[in-house]
């Protein structure tokens, strides 16, 4: 576990260097885009695994899971550039200050999400809807674990 | 080619059915997120293939190419719900009306982008930076072909 955390931290650092010239507003916009696009794909999986299992479609499940895994593997840590704990991308960031200071806590949720997202793509490829539903739940838990610790509540209540 | 276009159209139709309940503003937000997140990953590839070849990193190239391929395969056609030729997601949509009427033209650019994006992931996996640079150019051309035909110029000039 320790070495995994170190590896994840190293990956974030390297990616961070490559993107050092990113504007704060662009970095926030890119990360909000990544999470929002994952949300669409999680929504599609929820639709076919929970809301309406009769609509399960293996190819669409694989496609959605692949987006989530590829996004998880894309080095989004590089988008948490110094100073981007405050600021506006598409909207004002909801990142908590702790996301920029609690390296060990962030490493843990990042490694957990990465693991579950990659497993999601693997399980989707088997076409086993029941197993995918279980793994979908695990991914959702790993999203939630990070949100609860490192994301502010919504600024306004549209829903 | 004809059958490929038909298949692409069919895929869009099926995916469209599954997402029929999407709100117009959410559909626009999701597609803007997908394109913006791809733009970040295209930017990373440009950085390591063109701007600063010394920074080429195989793992990061694969990660970026996988995001682009997974996004291309995700059935974004479903996000062009009826009525979403006008409206606001993160910002006002720049989709031209023709994107909702010129089915054959849209099919052509969609199939071309899909092909080049999947090839990008394949070439990235080989670790051949020179070949990847060529394929990166082809993906960029396929993006541009769609933008020129189906996307309005920027509404405001921030840059």
Image (cartoon, coloured by chain):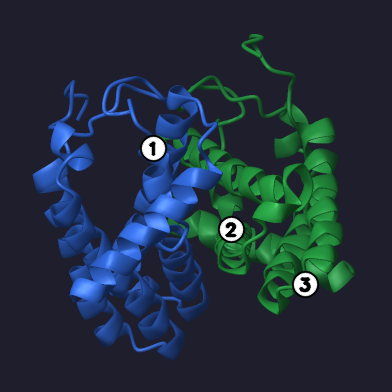
Chain colours: A green, B blue
Q: Is there CB contact under 8 Å for labels 2 and 1?
A: no
Residue A139 position within the rendered picture, expressed as x and y whole percent measured from the top left: 78, 53
Find disc 1 in the rendering and name its residue: B32
Relative height, residue A105 to residue B136 (above, below): above
Relative height, residue B4 to residue A86 (above, below): below
Q: Secondary structure at mark 2?
A: helix
Instruction: Report whether B60 appears left or right of B124.
Output: right
Q: Determine which of the numbered discs, if any, sits on residue B122 in the image.
A: none
**Is residue A28 in view?**
yes
Q: CA distance from mark 3 to mark 1?
A: 31 Å
Whichever of callouts 3 and 2 sits on the residue coming sooner in the sequence is 2
Find disc 3 in the rendering and name its residue: A128
Residue B81 position within the rendered picture, expressed as x and y whole percent measured from the top left: 38, 35
Q: Is there CB contact under 8 Å for labels 3 and 1?
A: no
Which residue appears farthest toward the left when viewing the image? Answer: B148
Q: Secondary structure at mark 3?
A: loop
Relative height, residue B17 to residue A120 (above, below): above
Placement of the N terminus of chain B among the 4 image quadrants: bottom left
Q: Which circle, 2 or 1, is nearer the viewer?
A: 2
- Dot 1: chain letter: B
Residue A101 position within the rendered picture, expressed as x and y whole percent measured from the top left: 76, 38
Which residue appears farthest toward the right when viewing the image? Answer: A1
- Dot 3: chain letter: A
Q: Are the residues under badges 2 and 1 in a single subunit? A: no
Q: Is there CB contact under 8 Å for labels 3 and 2?
A: no
Find disc 2 in the rendering and name its residue: A64
**Picture quadrant of residue A69:** bottom right
Q: Residues within 10 Å of mark 2 (few under 14, many from 20)?
A: many
**Picture quadrant of residue A145:** top right
Q: Residues within 10 Å of mark 1 (few under 14, many from 20)?
A: many
Q: CA distance from mark 3 to mark 2?
A: 15 Å
Q: Which circle, 3 or 1, is nearer the viewer?
A: 3
């Amino acid at each position: 576990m320790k070495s995994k955390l170190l590896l994840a931290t190293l990956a974030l650092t390297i990616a961070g260097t490559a993107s050092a010239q990113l504007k704060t507003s662009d970095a926030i916009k890119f990360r909000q885009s990544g999470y929002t696009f994952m949300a669409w794909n999680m929504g599609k999986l929820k639709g076919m695994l929970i809301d309406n299992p009769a609509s399960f479609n293996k190819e669409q499940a694989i496609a959605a899971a692949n987006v989530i895994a590829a996004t998880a593997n894309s080095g989004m840590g590089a988008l948490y550039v110094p100073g981007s704990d405050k600021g506006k991308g598409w909207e004002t960031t909801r990142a908590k200050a702790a996301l920029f200071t609690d390296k060990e806590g962030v490493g843990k949720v990042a490694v957990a999400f990465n693991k579950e997202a990659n497993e999601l793509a693997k399980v989707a490829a088997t076409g086993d809807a029941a197993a995918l539903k279980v793994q979908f739940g695990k991914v959702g838990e790993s999203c939630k674990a990070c949100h609860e610790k490192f994301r502010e509540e919504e600024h306004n209540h549209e829903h």
